[in-house]
Amino acid sequence: TDAKVSQVVEQKRVDELPLNGRDFVQLAMLSAGMENRQTDRGLLSTNGTRGNGVGFLFDGVDGNDANALFLSLTPSIEAIQEFNIQTSTYSAEFGRTAGAQINLVTKAGGNEFHGSVFEFFRNAALDAKNYFDLPDEPIPPFTRNQFGFVVSGPIRRNKMFFLANYEGTRMRKALTARATVPTLAERNGDFS
């Protein structure tokens, strides 16, 4: 009755899978035929399509930017109830893109108040030394904080509910850069 090829990533896996940078788009890599293609033409490639061939829906609302290349919003992992990716022969209601259609269902509020606060911290203490760093120099500093909250509850009991989500990232890092500058003799044409 339905020829679509799809995969659902349920809330338990969304919450428990380690995602670098807490980026929900990485959940798409769990599906066959997906390739991470972070270019100026899109985020993902599906079964060989261009990077802009992936469409995003958030609770049934188009989540692409005006050029259909990137996401217009990125909800926190804590706010995602279900991640559904359709990679082939999906119905015409999703026909905007040739590659895949990613449908996110966000958590909904209820008659009880619920919430969570989180912070993820990473620093250079366990980082390896960059190949281009001088051996006698310390590892360049790196600090990354990702923090936020999700809160939900009733506005009007049994009638209207809310869910609020905020996530922030603060990153401070130093990069090693090496360059070769020609000597005065080389600038004058002497390459001996």
Image (tube, rainbow, N blue to C red):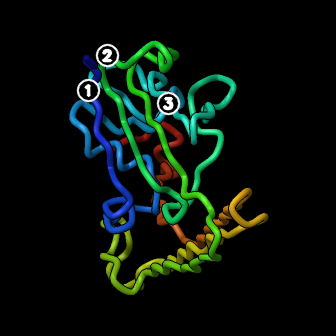
15 vs 150, left or right, is left
Dividing the picture into quadrants, the one containing residue 69 is top right
Secondary structure under badge 2? loop
Residue marked by disc 2: 89
Q: For residue 176, which numbered disc appears in the image?
A: none
Q: Please tell me whether mark 1 or mark 3 is closer to you in this view.
A: 1
For disc 2, the neighbor class at 10 Å (few under 14, some 14 to 19, many from 20) is some
Mark 1 lies on a secondary structure that is strand
Residue at 67% from the left image edge and 62% from the top image edge? 163
Numbered label attached to residue 5:
1
**How far apart in space, not on screen, are marks 2 and 3 (Cα)?**
21 Å
Q: Nearer the viewer, residue 151 or 134?
A: 151
Q: Are marks 2 and 1 in contact (CB under 8 Å)?
A: yes
Badge 2 or badge 1: first in the primary sequence? 1
Tell me the amino acid under the disc marked 2: Thr
The residue beneath circle 3 is 42
